[in-house]
Amino acid sequence: MFKKILAFLAEYLRINAIRRMLDIVEVKRSEVAGLVGFAVAFAAFEGVGLSLLLPVLQYAEGGTTAIADSSGLIWRTLDRLLEALQLPLTLPVLLGLAFTPILLRQVVFFFMAWYSTVISSRIGIRLQMRTLDTILDADPEFFTRNPVGRIVGILFGQTGAAGAAILAVIRQISVVLLMALYIAILLVISVPLTATTLLFAILVSMIIKANINKIRDYAVQAANISQDMMGRIVERLSLMRLIKLRDQKQQESANIRKFALVMRDIAIKQTKLGAGIEVTADPLLMLSVFVTLYLGIAVLGMSLAQLGMLIFVLTRLNGKVKEFNGVRQAISANMAGLMLVKHMTDDAKRSNTITSGPLRFEGLKDRIVFSGVGFEYPDGYDSDGNLVSAGKTVLTGVDLTIPAGSFTALVGRSGAGKSTLVELLPRLRDAGTGTITFDGVDIHEFQVGSLRKGIGYLTQSAMLFNETVRDNLSYGLDYEPSEEQIRRALERAYASFVYDLPEGLETLLGDRGVRFSGGEQQRISLARVLLEDSSILILDEPTSSLDSESEGYIQKALSDLHGEKTIIVIAHRLATVIQADQLLVVEGGQIEERGTHAELVAKNGAYKRLFETQLIT
């Protein structure tokens, strides 16, 4: 029986939901103490103010004699207070004493509202930044499972639920304290009537329990749909040129409208359930007042002062019961958003398998060695446990030596494992088997940050922000480059054209560098890499989508850097790789052939077949 009562209270007070919330949200003890302290002070002043109303009503009913003839804790306390303050027993004095704690209660309410907002915003920001840090630490595979729109939606939408959830919990604490206070006052007035009131309150809570559970389920559904819609909108906006070229404006608009209509229907259902709670709760709570009045008048023969106090407290109690049920709804609704945050952060944590070592990477001096390196993609699952992508083996038994200062080119069919192979060097991914060493030191011994900063990386699509040329060039540098250093890097990357722009280095690039051609974007990206002054330079198909003139600039830059840096290039075009010191043909996750261009053509093997089928042109 006792366990059932505890289980009911845990469900009624949403204790289990609050526990789950506190597992997700970081709340400091000092913050809790401050919030609870304000709630207790608010309840205390409320209780004192209400208690002092009874003597006022008794005075109104029978004057000084009625009060003097009454007994109880309230009168004894009031008598001592009047004596200590040397105040007469008059109506103005009684009203003044009753009004003072009510006024103080409102002062406490002001500070409680201010402090609650401060704390809830702190909690929301903490959760947001912790989520962001976890996502930024995640391995690349995490981002293949989670669209950017969904990540942004959860990061800036659902993390806000943390503050709202904590506010709801604090409101619940405050409401529970006030309800306990009202019940205590009712107990002083009449124990039987208090028991009757509590029975009605429990009945109301049991009746609306199903509606609250349904509201929670709809909140979870709405949160998931909202993130899906956010992901779709971000994705579509990033491909606006394709939408226009395919004339799909109406179709895309219709798709978003479907999402919006589903969200509208959910909101309507939640509103109907909430209205159903009001329709059910209000009559029952008012019925409790009438039943209590009947018992007080017909059965217990209470005085008018007692009845007036009873009605006043019951009205306040019923209002708090309604508010409490609203808070329960708010906690359930906000938990949906918090659970989405938890699922995403848990997924990001699981994917973050790359740990940093103790040594700082100071640049490549001798060679990079791959020994029996293998890699496979694991099965990918979404937050609901559904299989998103099946795992597959990408690299097996790769043995490779790259001397410092050499130019190595990787060629092969799409999907052969070339990009995965070079991603192992800055530890964007970690090999599943085998070892990779830099100058004889295992790659895991290096600090991840210093290793990545020691490797310049240029991808097929230029990685540029919608900021100025100068901001893009200096992004991530450990120093503020001088004008001469910037000019030198731009010249070596054949990107001096930026000085011919009206605003020069202060020119905004537009979204992902859209204001510049592909070749210009790549040359700006190369200049940024050169400003890093890293000893290793990786280029992943840097010229695959460029015109011949832009490709020529990139090739000239590589030729100038040949021997100065360790260059590793993935490319399909012969003009880009023909100057390499060693060519590696990657097939089926293995290095099938290696040698210079002339050696591999003479060998009449896989490299020559690629050349003849014009995969290298």
Image (cartoon, rainbow, N blue to C red):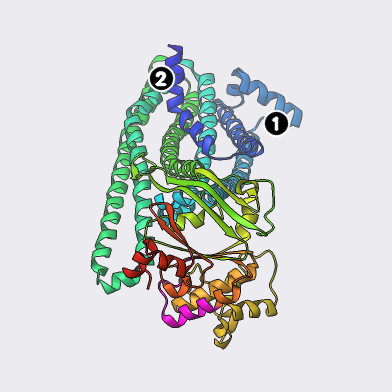
**Residue indicated by mark 1:** 88
Kindly identify the amino acid type of the residue bearing the numbered disc 2.
Thr
Q: Give the number of callouts.
A: 2
Question: Badge 1: how crowded within 10 Å, few (<14), some, or many (20+)?
Answer: few
Q: Which residues are magenta?
A: 539-556
Kindly identify the amino acid type of the residue bearing the numbered disc 1.
Pro
- Callout 1–callout 2 Cβ contact below 8 Å: no
Instruction: Give the position of the C terminus as an image quadrant.
Output: bottom left
Q: Is residue 513 above or below residue 14?
A: below
Q: Is residue 547 a member of the stretch shown in magenta?
A: yes
Name the quadrant containing residue 104.
top right
Question: Badge 2: how crowded within 10 Å, few (<14), some, or many (20+)?
Answer: some
Residue 553 vs residue 564, the one in the foreground:
564
**Residue indicated by mark 2:** 196
Is residue 515 visible in the rendered structure shown here?
no
Q: Is residue 38 above or below residue 535?
A: above
Residue depth check, mark 1 versus mark 2: number of the one nearer the observer: 2
Give the Cα separation between the discs numbered 1 and 2: 38 Å
Instruction: Give the position of the N terminus as an image quadrant.
Output: top left
Q: Is residue 108 above or below residue 508?
A: above
The secondary element bearing badge 2 is classed as: helix
Residue 331 image point, x, y percent? 45, 38
Q: Is residue 232 left or right of residue 335?
A: left
Write the residue at 35% across / 52% down.
Answer: 228
